[in-house]
């Protein structure tokens, strides 16, 4: 009984100190300021957005080389929640035994960018509906591919990144055997380390437990400064 009472007390304290998060037009709670984010991190360090380092990155959304044909991010940085970033490092370590590595295209994505992306596409298979929010907005999804560590070259995959066609699906199999094997290698290693594949995109993986992380609309430059 004493232990149960202590647990209930801790829960009450946590609830009492958790910051209020305003709801948007869809009724979703979206964290939009660094002060609220820092309070959430103080309550749960797993909610820290950590910069991804030690792997190749190619942040297309910081350039005009993306499906929107305009830069969407102010800096070419990738951030993920702390346990997601740790799991990704474990993936990189396992792949390194085979002289392979990861190239990361995207991680945390501000909610306002998802709103911009939705307008020209409006297809939830490829762009998250802002009425629901994205795992990317929670810092719990990652877009990536495999590379040869010796050359830095990407392994052959079904499509380029952000190809919005049926060919990008995980179950599309009218492909060369090498491509199918490469896609399976990426999928299998990610699944072993706590990620689930998105059926419509071979490059997108959601971290299990993503629901514990709030939707965010924080500027990447503020996160960069916070991680220094």
Image (cartoon, rainbow, N blue to C red):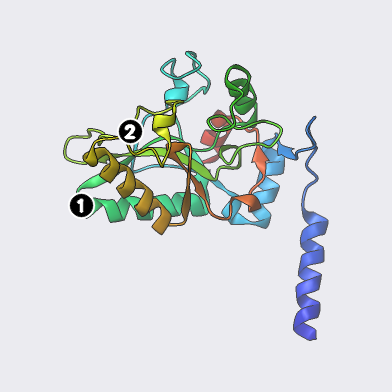
* Quadrant including the N terminus: bottom right
Quarter where residue 59 is shown: top left
120 shown above or below 106: above
Q: Considering only vertical position in the picture, is 70 above or below 204?
A: above
Q: Position of residue 209 (x, y in %)?
A: 58, 55
Residue 116 spot, x, y in % from top left: 62, 21
Residue displayed at 76% across by 69% down: 10
- Horizontal side, residue 119 vs residue 227: left or right: right
In the rendered image, which quarter is residue 166 located in? top left
Is the residue 174 above or below the residue 61 in the image?
below
Say left or right for 210 vs 170: right
How many marks the image carries: the answer is: 2
Q: Is residue 56 left or right of residue 215?
A: left
Numbered disc 1: secondary structure: loop
Residue behind mark 2: 158
Residue 56: mark: none
* Observer-nearest of 190 and 56: 190
Question: In the image, which disc is placed on residue 98?
Answer: 1
Q: Nearer the viewer, residue 195 or 13?
A: 195
Helix, strand or loop for disc 2: loop
C-alpha gap between disc 1 and disc 2: 21 Å
Give the residue at the far front of this rendering: 174
Residue at image position (80%, 45%) is: 20
Q: Are marks 1 and 2 in contact (CB under 8 Å)?
A: no
> What residue do we see at 72% from left, 37% from top?
30
Query: In this rendering, does residue 125 appear at all?
Result: yes
How many residues crowd around disc 2 within 10 Å: few (fewer than 14), some, or many (20 or more)? many
Q: Position of residue 49 (x, y in %)?
A: 55, 44
């Amino acid at each position: 009984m004493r232990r149960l009472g202590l647990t209930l007390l801790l829960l009450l304290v946590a609830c009492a100190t958790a910051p209020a998060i305003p709801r948007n037009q869809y009724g979703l709670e979206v964290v939009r300021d660094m002060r609220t984010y820092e309070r959430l991190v103080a309550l749960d360090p797993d909610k820290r957005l950590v910069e991804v380092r030690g792997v190749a990155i190619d942040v297309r959304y910081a350039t005009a080389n993306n499906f929107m044909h305009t830069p969407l991010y102010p800096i070419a940085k990738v951030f993920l929640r702390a346990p997601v970033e740790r799991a990704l490092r474990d993936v990189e370590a396992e792949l390194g035994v085979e002289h392979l590595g990861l190239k990361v295209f995207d991680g945390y994505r501000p909610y306002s960018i998802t709103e911009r992306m939705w307008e020209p596409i409006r297809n939830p298979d490829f762009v998250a509906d802002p009425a629901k929010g994205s795992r990317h907005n929670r810092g719990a999804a990652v877009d990536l591919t495999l590379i040869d560590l010796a050359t830095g070259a990407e392994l052959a995959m079904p499509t380029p990144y952000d190809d919005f066609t049926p060919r990008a699906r995980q179950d599309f199999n009218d492909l060369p055997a090498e491509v199918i094997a490469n896609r399976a290698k990426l999928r299998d290693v990610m699944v072993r380390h706590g990620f689930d594949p998105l059926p419509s995109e071979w490059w997108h993986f959601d971290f299990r437990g993503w629901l514990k992380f709030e939707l965010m609309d924080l500027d990447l430059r503020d996160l960069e400064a916070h991680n220094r």
